[in-house]
Image (cartoon, grey):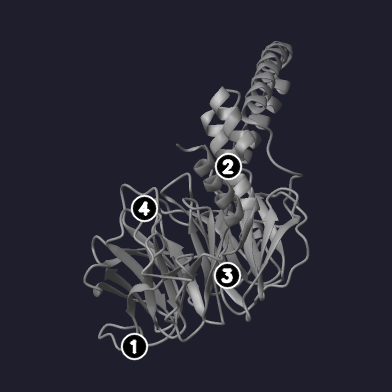
Amino acid sequence: MWKEIEKRESGRVGTRSFANRVKSSRVASLQLSNHKDIVSPHKGSVNSLQVDLTEGRYLLSGASDASAAVYDVQQPQKLEGGGLIAKHKPIFVIDKQHEHRHKYAISSAIWYPIDTGLFVTGSYDHYIKVWDTNSTQVVMNFKMPGKVYSTAMSSLATSHMLIAAGTEDVQVRLCDIASGAFAHTLSGHRDGVMTVQWSNSSEYVLVTGGCDGAIRFWDIRRAGCFRVLDQSHSQLGRRPPLLERSTMTKGSTSRSLSGGQNMSKGTAVLRKSSHGNGAKHSGSNRTSAKGSIKHRLHPGMLTSQDRATAHYGAVTGLKISEDGMYLFSAGSDSRLRLWDIESGCNTLVNFETVRLQTNKPLQLSVSEDSALVFVPCMTVVKAFDFWSGKTHFTFRGHYEYVNCCCYSALDQELYTGGNDRQILVWSPFISYEADEETTRNEDSWSD
């Protein structure tokens, strides 16, 4: 670390490069925290975790005992072990004693993306509730047709305040906080919808994964889905860099232009030669026009592509990379896949064999630079390299199945929750011996 600081001070390393190196080294040293402990009030399995997107300070959790809690992960309520262990107790808990409580398990708990004044919970009691954080009161209710598996709000949205809800019903519903009513109903899945994710590059694009094994892309401004991912439609590895692609497209357009000029000369010769050939040429024009019309039909309307599947079982988890270019999916077939969003292709990254839960949605997470993806794999959490598929780290600490994980980009920490009712913190390694040595050196050099 000191060598990196020396390079930064001498100007050999840029500011952004230095920050990325420090963050990468901190992520590489993640381990079960020995200085931060979250006191869980839940009496059931922890199903959902999220750190707020504005301050990166408040952690929201939802559990199967129909309770939700909020913690301040920056300011501990109590110090133990001579001030070395910070105890983070919940700021407030919404449990079965609350008058507006959920009746059954909370499957999803998310923050309002603009500020921490609101949060949203979805439950197996068929309700989605919008809560005021300060008063801990329900400000809005949405009655769903079945159990709520997943909820999501777009962090990019400026023109809408929609909650996307995946339930055991085949239709995806968009709940509008502004009006308190359902804004859209998206039809296309043939079974329940386990997971929903908004795009990181467009506020209008929604990605859903269903129990029918399909992953569908929706543009909420138009009817029907515009893409269905097919696991047999593949490309090897990532797309070429942007500069290479631009030079490639320039070369292809120049070749097409030269080819077009040659074709125009040829068509002129055909028109001069005979009337019959000219008729044939017009016929070919008509067929090409029909072909272009068929190409313009979006895939959701074509029966062959509409029945394509991304997994052989239910799609239990989705996570879009930070740059919005790639999609990571997990299925009940215990398969992990990485998709190129632009082309809709399976990148064929060979992720190591894992065992995944099959009866509930899994909450995945990615590191800030999308280099690692964190996946709950039964009783452990594994961190996979995005492009090699190799397991970089295996986090062992839970006694039962892990359901959710949430990565905090502010502190480079990972939070995990499982059926053992615990919320564990995985922090970068801190050496107290090194700190003592530095303070000793400072004392020896001080006047």
How far is mark 2 from mark 4, CA to CA?
21 Å
Q: Quadrant of residue 336?
A: bottom right
Nearer to us: label 4 or label 1: 4
Horizontal and vertical percent for residue 445? 52, 37
At numbered mark 2, what does the secondary structure look like: helix, strand or loop?
Answer: helix
Image: 158 above or below 126: above
How far is mark 3 from mark 4, CA to CA?
25 Å
| Image position of 355 (left or right of 121) | right
Point out the tag, 3 or 2, that comes first from the N-terminus.
2
| Image position of 235 (left or right of 51) | right
At numbered mark 1, what does the secondary structure look like: helix, strand or loop?
Answer: loop
Asked whether residue 430 is in view, the answer is no
Q: Which mark is residue 55?
A: 4
Q: Which residue sits at x=28%, y=85%?
A: 98
Image: 303 above or below 170: above
Image: 159 above or below 427: above
How far is mark 4 from mark 1, CA to CA?
29 Å
Q: Which mark is residue 96?
A: 1
How far is mark 3 from mark 2, CA to CA?
29 Å
* Callout 4 amino acid: Glu
Which residue is label 2 attached to?
22
Choose between 60 and 323: the one closer to the eye. Answer: 60
How packed is label 2: few (under 14 Cα within 10 Å), some, or many (20 or more)? some
How far is mark 2 from mark 1, CA to CA?
43 Å
Horizontal and vertical percent for residue 193? 52, 70
Asked whether residue 283 is in view, the answer is yes
Point out the tag, 1 or 3, that comes first from the N-terminus.
1
Q: Which mark is residue 362?
A: 3
Choose between 329 and 84: the one closer to the eye. Answer: 84
At numbered mark 4, what does the secondary structure look like: helix, strand or loop?
Answer: loop
* Callout 2 amino acid: Val
